[in-house]
Amino acid sequence: MHRLSLTRASCAALLTVVGLLALPGCSEEEDPKPSGPGTKVDAGTDAGTEPDAGTDAGVIVDAGTPWDGGVTGTFSCAGKQGQTYSFTPGQEQQIQDRVNSLTECATIQLAAGTYTFDNAITIRKDGITFAGAGKGTKGEATGGASSTVLVFTNAAANTNGLDVVGKLFTVRDVAIWNAKKDALRIENSTDVLIQRVRTEWAQQNKESNGKYGIYPVKSKYVTIDDCEAYNAADAGIYVGQTEYAIVRNNKALQNVAGIEIENTRFAFVHGNLAQDNTTGLVVFDLPGNPIVGTDIRFQNNKVLDNNRPNFASVTASSSTVSQVPAGTGTFILASRRVEFSGNTWSNNNTVDIAVLSGLAIEPDPAQWSAGGGNWGTSDIYIHDNTFQGGSGDSVDNGAPDQEKRPFGAVVFAAYQYAAAAQGILRVEHILWDGIDPAPRDPKHPNAINLCVGANTVPQSTKNIMVDFDLQAVSGNLTGSSPNLTTAWGFTKHYAQGAAPYNCAGFNPPVVTGSL
């Protein structure tokens, strides 16, 4: 990877970059319009055909009791005689026939080997277990002696791999290879266990790859455990519009987004590895969605080397994900009551953690009306983590794109100037866009309650965080005569423990489960 030499940035090169910027400025009287076209919205559900399982925003789930992954819904297989149907490679049509005639509480057991399908495996019954002999290893396109690989390379266009709607569903010990759309899609379901599943596409960095690897959406009580996801053109492991989720001990590599939590309430994401993605961990709400995400806890995750070029389709993927600059370790947007502890970040070229308002992606507040104006980010607690270093020295891998990734283009231009004029060679570990609340109140500089403390940082770290003030910076980087000095002057830099970000979290604390 070519790493930009920030210390040698010329004035001419800086002005060329800044000349690309066309971010609208705004006065204190106007609605903030900081940094994105914000015209394409994808709520992550791409035309689900089943009825919505009651996920409107009218009822807030009581988070007073932590959920540890056990069965909680109303459906049970206790006392019911469930049948087990066993299959071997070569019986693909028999599998499809059986799936189409399942009764509740049945088990589909697949022996080790390779199974080739020309259409999705569609399950619409409750209490179903779908199991193989093992998920195999990365790059394994055919099943071995102890792995079951479901191949969809020649399946019909725009079809998923395993497509499920049901209560008390378990899938384990299988790999899903080259699905045309989403590899494992589970929608409107309750009490879901996804265990030891690998989803993968054969080629890296292909916009035409399926969007999602593991994709539970509009569901409740979901556990994703010991799974792997590779080469998804949107998110490798995704939880969306869901209440209560545990995402633990998984690996997400070579995706646009490694692990994504979207419009979800009460998720516990722990013990995962997010490496070599465009962005490692993502938590956000999208406009136009009535589910207001809240109470997300990230603990003991490793977020390393997430510098893969963004290969998401601007039209086919979430507009939010397609706008993330390469090298973003963790991306927080339009989120509230989010806690990070015990996590490790290193070598993420743009920044380890970006904390953004939803208005940075969709600047029209009216577009957020479905969620009651849920663009605001608030109550973010980042404590007792480790920042190993090596991050922030090559924003968007030194290749900013104003049209596709405008936020990264602004950060790139500002820090190019800082490198040339002030010798500041890295973006701080944590970048806050400074938008919420809008307009800002100078008497309350930390109105969103962003709390940073007790993190381990390299000895060379002077400041752990920057208030980037995206609205002011971008406003001074537009027009025929951009004012780099004035733009940079709006940024504010903070050492760990400095007021007003030395707060101690929020109350009541996140209650999402335990290790």
Image: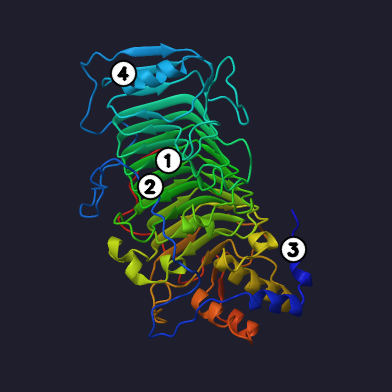
Which amino acid lies under the numbered mark 3 shown in the image of this protein? Leu
Disc number placed over residue 106 in the picture, else none: 4
Q: Earlier in the sequence, mark 4 or mark 3?
A: 3
* Secondary structure under the numbered disc 2 in the rendered image: strand
Residue 408: x %, y % from top left: 59, 65
Q: Nearer the viewer, mark 2 or mark 3?
A: 2
Which amino acid lies under the numbered mark 4 shown in the image of this protein? Ala
| In this rendering, position of residue 515 left or right of residue 258 | left
| In this rendering, position of residue 238 left or right of residue 507 | right
Quadrant assignment, res 160 = top left
Residue 285: x %, y % from top left: 39, 57
What residue is pinned by disc 3? Answer: 4
- Marks 2,1: beta carbons within 8 A: yes
Disc number placed over residue 240 in the picture, else none: 2
Q: Distance between the residues labelled 3 and 1?
A: 36 Å
Q: Earlier in the sequence, mark 2 or mark 4?
A: 4
- 333 in relation to 220, above or below: below
Q: Nearer the viewer, mark 3 or mark 1?
A: 1
* Secondary structure under the numbered disc 4 in the rendered image: loop
Q: Which of marks 3 and 1 is nearer the N terminus?
A: 3
Residue 176: x %, y % from top left: 51, 30
Q: Which residue occupies 64% across, 61% down? A: 396
Q: Which of marks 2 and 1 is nearer the N terminus?
A: 1
Q: How far apart are marks 2 and 4 (CA)?
A: 27 Å
